[in-house]
Image: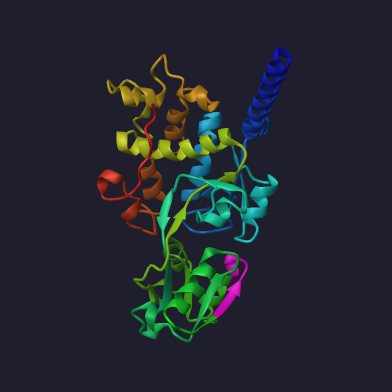
Amino acid sequence: MKIKLLSVAIGAAVFALGASAASAATLADVKAKGFVQCGVNSGLLGFAQPDASGNWAGFDVDFCKAVASAVFGDPTKVKYTPLSAKDRFPALQSGEVDVLSRNTTWTINRDTALGFNFRPITYYDGQGFMVRKSLNVKSALELSGAAICVQSGTTTELNLADYFKANNLQYNPVVFEKLEEVNAAYDSGRCDVYTTDQSGLYSLRLTLKNPDEHMILPEIISKEPLGPAVRQGDDQWFDIVSWTAYALINAEEFGITQANVDEMKNSPNPDIKRFLGSETDTKIGTDLGLTNDWAANVIKGVGNYGEVFERNIGQGSPLKIARGLNALWNKGGVQYAPPVR
């Protein structure tokens, strides 16, 4: 009996050791190479776009920088892999990228069959339609028979089919793999309508030859919860990516900004002191496999969620998208993060 119990104990210990090693794999790999490899959109104004010098900027790019700040204390420790909608999932599955931060919708199929993990929703979105004002269309229900530009390999393509079927409308899909091809086709008049996430439409409209000649229709035909994705089987990395997003939201709720983060370390509020790692007995950072000032480093690197939103896609940007659902839960929105304690 003792031999049997010893065998079971050894087996459990080996399993625990194996599980621990597996859970630390991505973090260890990231630290070994010295940067986070982040999969992003190949070019979507406000979300992920390189400038003429190859410097990336945008809402999703800032999340990559936030993860690098959490791991390294340095937002520059990122390399970007631009990915099409079709290529993004194989790139994550194969390990080509460590995290996918590419306006990607969380669905049950992607969460299960594709082997990914989603948790924080960084942007609550929904699919919409853009048309030329000259068509005199006021509603998506007036689009029967229209030629509609759409990108393949997306939930957008599937939602489009469902919406037109449900409303007994006909349409002619004009489908392309690459975002740049869809944009060019719509701008050149090959289709009457452009459909994608509404945030994307705000961005894409500004890239057209005559943006003021186009309008976005009022209908939202789907739920598009967008956020980062990682591979299943690595709980530690999943936690790091998830809590990085939650740190951005909690920081905004606490009133911690990129400018005042060091000053806020002296706050008398125990929640803030714990969050920023200034409590001497906290283990929150080390429990993640990071330093205890990981959250402070995230805010130093990119600011809080509101700062990231406003400068990239909000009122401080050319897109000027209203916060809407993406406001904090106590400001009329649904952005809500678990407590750091």
Snapshot colouring: rainbow
Q: Residue at x 45, y 62 (%)?
A: 203
The front one of 56 and 218 is 218
Task: Give the image location of residue 330, x and y in percent.
Answer: 26, 44
Q: At x 51% / y 22%, what residue is drawn?
A: 286
- The picture places residue 312, in percent across and down from the top left corner, at 42, 51
Q: Is residue 322 above or below residue 34?
A: below
Q: Residue 268's x, y, as percent?
A: 27, 20
Residue 212 in view in this figure: yes
- In the picture, the quarter occupied by the C terminus is top left
Does residue 80 belong to the magenta stretch?
Answer: no
Is residue 71 rendered to the left or right of residue 335?
Answer: right
Left or right of 215 on screen, residue 332: left
The residue at the point 49 percent across, 43 percent down is 63
Say which of 129 and 41 sits in front: 129
Q: Is 174 a magenta residue?
A: yes
Residue 192 pos. (x, y %): 48, 81
Within the image, what quadrant is residue 152 found in?
Answer: bottom right
Residue bounds of the magenta highlight: 173-181
Q: Residue at x 45, y 44 (%)?
A: 120
